[in-house]
Amino acid sequence: MKKVITYGSFDLFHEGHYNLLKRAKALGDYLIVGVTTEQYDESRGKLNIVDSLDKRIENVRQSGFADEIIVEDHQGQKVEDVQKYGIDIFTVGSDWIGTFDYMEEFCQVVYLERTKNISSTKVRTLNHPIIRIGVIGTGRIAVRFVPEAKYVSGVIVNCVYNPNRESAHAFCDKFELDLGTDNLEEFWENIDAVYIASPHETHYEYAKTALKRDKHVLCEKPLAFKKAQAEELFALAHEKNRILMEAIKTAYCPGFAQMMGIAKSGVIGRICDVEACFTRLTPPEMRERTDVQYGGGFTEFGTHTLLPIMKLMGTDYKEVRFDSILDEKGIDLYTKASFVYENGMALSKSGVAVKSEGQLLISGTKGYILCESPWWLTQYFEVRFEDPSKKERYFCKFLGQGLRYEISDFAYMINGHRGRSYKFTEEESIAIAGVMERFMEQREGRRNNVCLK
Ligand code: CTP
């Protein structure tokens, strides 16, 4: 009996998949089809799978060509499967020519002619028109956003706005966009969604205007400096039936989501304490060190550290206390925010002129999770116990600058898959704005009496 194996995502099952399976089956007597998990696809950079694994398996089954269906969930599995199942022929479509030549060591490799003019990517774009994203701001983050968006299908960054016309034009030329403008009216007319990457204090106003203009909004952190403002923005998004997402990229990257899941799974017992630290030494001339009202360690990095705290300990803290080291202008160089909860506590450390170990430590009644710096780009973490030999290690993919994950989730949600909002909820976003508000009120008060150099 000649055994054949093939693999694919088989998302939005189409004619090309049907033809491939038919010809694969014709190569032998018994066909095994490997269907990829969403996590595996994500780890190899495919961020746009729409159908669930169940549905994709069912579609392959219904084609009637597969004698056996298996799940592919990790790199290197093909080599294992071919040996395990005693495969004679490995086959995939001609778009993969050359890629799997290494399999010839184990079996025959056949590249089948791909069916022209059809692909899952194409079906996705036919189902949903391309989302045109405009960028507000041309600074450090905006520059990283545009190349990352290229990895997400179904979106195109087509224009940029900056009140400074030269900056808008330079950015537009650099990234070959359709439009660079200092005219907001013209900007709104050309987009479906906006990525707000302007100075912090302008986020709220731009987000509000964008929502009023029926645009979906992905807004850099912090979304707002006042709880009521964040509430108002989410209420407006509901009213307009638009997506509003605060862009904390950590929340959307696969490793962080996995770590949150493991922490909540009970493996470390009841979570009692979360400590998160993020510091970056910033030159004194930078905005973070010169902007008296909106600069400083906590407004800059506090959103990062508050994210795991709010996700794991909840938004309903009983008390929060801030201790800061301020410079002569009253800007916080380093801030500790300590939270007290009904059943636990949490600590956020952030700084622009004090260096500390940037780790995330989640302590529970049975063990703890340690994610070392840079935990906000989660690639590796450990689950540890009293008995050191029980230590578990987790390695996770984090591609490029990581912004592609939040852009992908933003596009998914715009296209009606609202399920992904659990990664960073409206309630968490509003609670973080509330903490920011309390911090800023307190810092303002302290400026008059505490001043350390
Ligand atoms: N395939 C094919 N003809 C097509 C599309 C896909 O023969 N028009 C083959 C691929 O070469 C692969 C298998 O079908 O062997 C599964 O492909 P998959 O990657 O799941 O589908 P695509 O449509 O190529 O998906 P995407 O657009 O997301 O890359």
Image: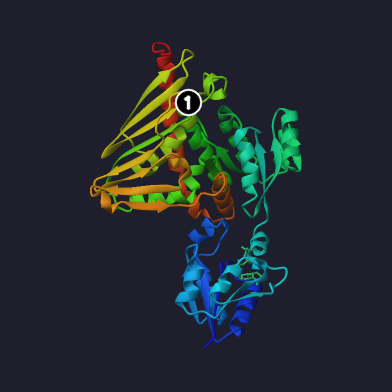
Q: Name the outermost residue toward the top.
A: 449
Please tell me whether residue 281 is drawn above or below residue 60 in the rendered image. above
Q: Name the outermost residue toward the bottom.
A: 1
Is the CB of the residue bearing disc 1 within 8 angstroms of ligand 1?
no
Relative depth, front residue between 211 and 89: 89
Relative depth, front residue between 267 and 373: 373
| x then y, percent, for residue 175 | 72, 41
Disc 1 is placed on an element classified as: loop
**Quarter holding ligand 1:** bottom right
Q: Is residue 72 visible?
A: yes
Please tell me whether residue 381 is drawn above or below residue 174 in the rendered image. below
Looking at the rendered structure, the number of numbered marks drawn on it comes to 1
Residue 101 image-quadrant placement:
bottom right
Please give the residue where the numbered disc 1 appears in the rendered image: 352
| x then y, percent, for residue 140 | 61, 33
Residue type of the residue flagged with mark 1: Val
Residue displayed at 55% across by 87% down: 29
Crowding at mark 1 (Cα within 10 Å: few <14, some 14-19, many 20+): many
Relative depth, front residue between 263 and 164: 263
Residue displayed at 39% across by 33% down: 357
- How are the colours assigned in the image? rainbow
| x then y, percent, for residue 359 | 39, 38
| x then y, percent, for residue 314 | 36, 41
Q: Quadrant of the C terminus?
A: top left
**Left or right: 131 with respect to 82?**
right
Residue displayed at 41% across by 12% down: 451
**Left or right: 355 with respect to 185?**
left
Residue displayed at 47% across by 32% down: 301
**Left or right: 317 with respect to 215?**
left
Q: Is residue 433 visible?
A: no
